[in-house]
Image: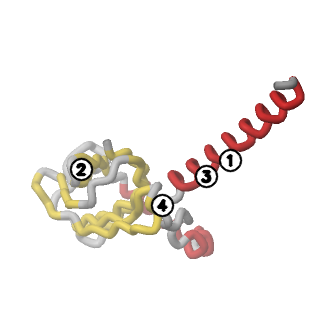
Amino acid sequence: MTPRVTWIIAIVGLLAGNVIAMVILAVVANDGGTQVIPQYYDRAAHYDDELDRASASRALGWHAEVAIAAGAVDVTVSDAAGRAIEGARVHITGYQRAHAGELLDLELATTGGGHYRGDLRERRGWHDLTIAADRGGAHYVQHVAVEAR
């Protein structure tokens, strides 16, 4: 075999390997679902409303801690002094980043002591969630990114 033929075979082999690798990556990376952030246009159009809600929530001084594990989401709501907020209505909306087309919308049940819990489809990875807590006319909203392991 001449050096010319060897080079041609090497170049064609590298190109074919690259095409095969790209096809494999394209098939593995595409699950067929949408990857666009849900309602992104509406959220952008009403951004001033979002700023007003965030300001009111900061003034209220509440805080929500979120954890996702074993197919459940746990939220603990507390006030500025760290006291548990009991008797609130806690609602979660959002999505798992890798499956943005599958929206999450849960009303959480109280488990006592400012803790609230709800069941969700068990998916590992990052979730972008909005926690809304209402009690006695007070309305609190917090956006979080939490990883389910």
According to the image, label 3 marks what residue?
Answer: 23
Report which quarter residue 89 is drawn in. Answer: bottom left
According to the image, label 1 marks what residue?
Answer: 19
Residue 31, numbered label: 4
Whether residue 122 sits left or right of residue 5 in the image: it is left
Whether residue 67 sits left or right of residue 10 in the image: it is left
Three-letter amino acid code at the position of disc 3: Val
Mark 2 and mark 3: Cα distance apart in space = 45 Å
Q: Is residue 15 above or below residue 110?
A: above
Whether residue 28 sits left or right of residue 129 in the image: it is right
How packed mark 2 is, by other alpha carbons closer than 10 Å (few <14, some 14-19, many 20 or more), is many
**Reading the chain from its start, which is encountered first: label 2 or label 3?**
3
Q: Nearer the viewer, mark 2 or mark 3?
A: 3
**CB under 8 Å between discs 1 and 3:** yes
Seen from the viewer's position, the closer of residues 35 and 88 is 35
The C terminus - image quarter: top left
The residue that appears at 33% across and 46% down in the rendered structure is: 148
Residue 82 x/y as whole percent = 25, 43
